[in-house]
Image (cartoon, rainbow, N blue to C red):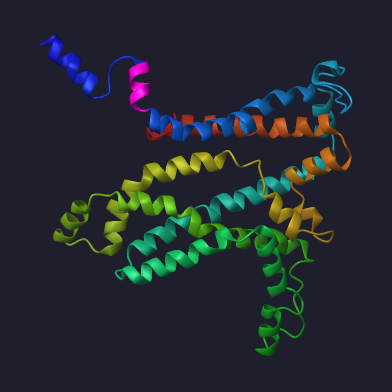
């Protein structure tokens, strides 16, 4: 009996780790390039964080620079420009979390209710398209549409709604709203893919039973679709929490300008200027390390709360 159980386990994928590895070799080789990429570009560079505690110079190695402890951390925490960038980053991230994050979910729910397969695919394709456009192209497009002599201003003037052009890109008060709209337009369709996949995995018998009980479309969404994809939504929300102290450098750099710097300047831009602009590599590394530590702590906290109250988490 035990012998048969042992053979059954081996046939099902049990046995020594090396034997399982040999059986899975083609799949392991498929994963290998991704692991090598992560090792080179994600894990090995972590060792470079040591320069945050040094006065680093390009002319010397990591181990021959003077150690300065938390000098650079103290320096940026006393810098008013850093706190301006920190405030803008948090505000833009909150807008992204509470406005941009729910839209892919709503899009997936809405498209799931479209009976026409052809129309559904057409809308999906159109919503994906902006994701494949480079931010340089996206920025140029939106700047042209919303410029003083752009399409929107001309339409509003011709319709008699306004008498003079609206300064969209030179008014600091408008930047965060416009940046959120641009990010929403570019990323909603692509981000909705994971929710499309989650919805497609729901057992169709649940919907059939609900229809027999007299449930309408909204009732099915409320009591079947949303609860069934709630785990996916929670996981994605936990991941988005980690980006609370991270901004979108492309939008800040390409759509921001001297007029809107008080609202568009974010931590990534600050780090870039300190590191490459003023050659303060140790200072910039300290800022980046601060961001990373805060992000990890936020993800761990969000995961802990999710596991405690919803029994869903990353790990």
Q: Main secondary structure of the magenta part?
A: helix
| Picture quarter with the N terminus | top left
x 45%, y 55%: residue: 192
Q: Does 20 appear in magenta?
A: yes
Query: Is residue 56 shown left or right of residue 142?
Result: right
Instruction: Tell me where residue 231 sits by quadrant.
Output: top left
Residue 62 in the image, given as x and y percentages of width and height: 80, 20
| Picture quarter with the C terminus | top left
Query: Is residue 213 shown left or right of residue 225?
Result: left
x 72%, y 34%: residue: 288
**Residue 181 visible within the image:** yes
Q: As rendered, which of 160 and 186 lies closer to the eye?
A: 186
Q: Which residues are magenta?
A: 18-24
Q: As rendered, which of 152 and 60 lies closer to the eye?
A: 60
In this rendering, is residue 304 above or below 82? Answer: above
x 60%, y 53%: residue: 95
In this rendering, is residue 194 above or below 126? Answer: above
Instruction: Tell me where residue 148 sits by quadrant.
Output: bottom right
Residue 5 in the image, given as x and y percentages of width and height: 16, 15
């Amino acid at each position: 009996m035990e012998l048969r159980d042992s053979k059954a386990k081996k046939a099902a994928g049990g046995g020594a780790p090396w034997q399982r590895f040999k059986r899975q070799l083609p799949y392991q080789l498929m994963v290998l390039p991704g692991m090598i990429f992560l090792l080179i570009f994600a894990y090995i560079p972590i060792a470079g964080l040591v320069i945050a505690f040094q006065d680093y110079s390009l002319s010397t190695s990591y181990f021959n620079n003077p150690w300065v402890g938390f000098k650079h951390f103290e320096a940026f925490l006393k810098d008013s420009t850093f706190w301006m960038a920190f405030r803008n980053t948090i505000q833009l991230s909150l807008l992204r979390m509470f406005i941009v994050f729910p839209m892919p979910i709503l899009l997936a729910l809405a498209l799931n209710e479209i009976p026409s397969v052809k129309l559904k695919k057409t809308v999906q394709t159109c919503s994906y398209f902006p994701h494949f456009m480079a931010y340089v192209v996206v920025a140029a497009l939106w700047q042209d549409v919303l410029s003083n002599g752009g399409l929107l201003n001309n339409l509003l003037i011709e319709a008699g709604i306004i008498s003079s052009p609206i300064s969209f890109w030179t008014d600091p008060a408008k930047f965060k709203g416009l940046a959120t709209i641009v990010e929403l337009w570019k990323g909603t369709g692509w981000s909705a893919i994971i929710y499309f996949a989650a919805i497609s995995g729901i057992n169709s018998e649940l919907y059939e039973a609900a229809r027999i009980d007299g449930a309408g479309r909204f009732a099915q969404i409320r009591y079947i679709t949303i609860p069934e994809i709630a785990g996916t939504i929670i996981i994605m929300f936990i991941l988005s929490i980690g980006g609370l102290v991270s901004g979108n450098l492309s939008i800040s750099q390409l759509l921001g300008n001297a007029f809107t710097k008080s609202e568009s300047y974010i931590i990534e831009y600050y780090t870039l200027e300190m590191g490459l602009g003023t050659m303060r590599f140790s200072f910039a590394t300290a800022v980046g390390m601060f961001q990373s530590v805060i992000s990890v702590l936020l993800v761990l906290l969000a995961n802990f709360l999710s596991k405690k109250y919803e029994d869903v988490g990353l790990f």
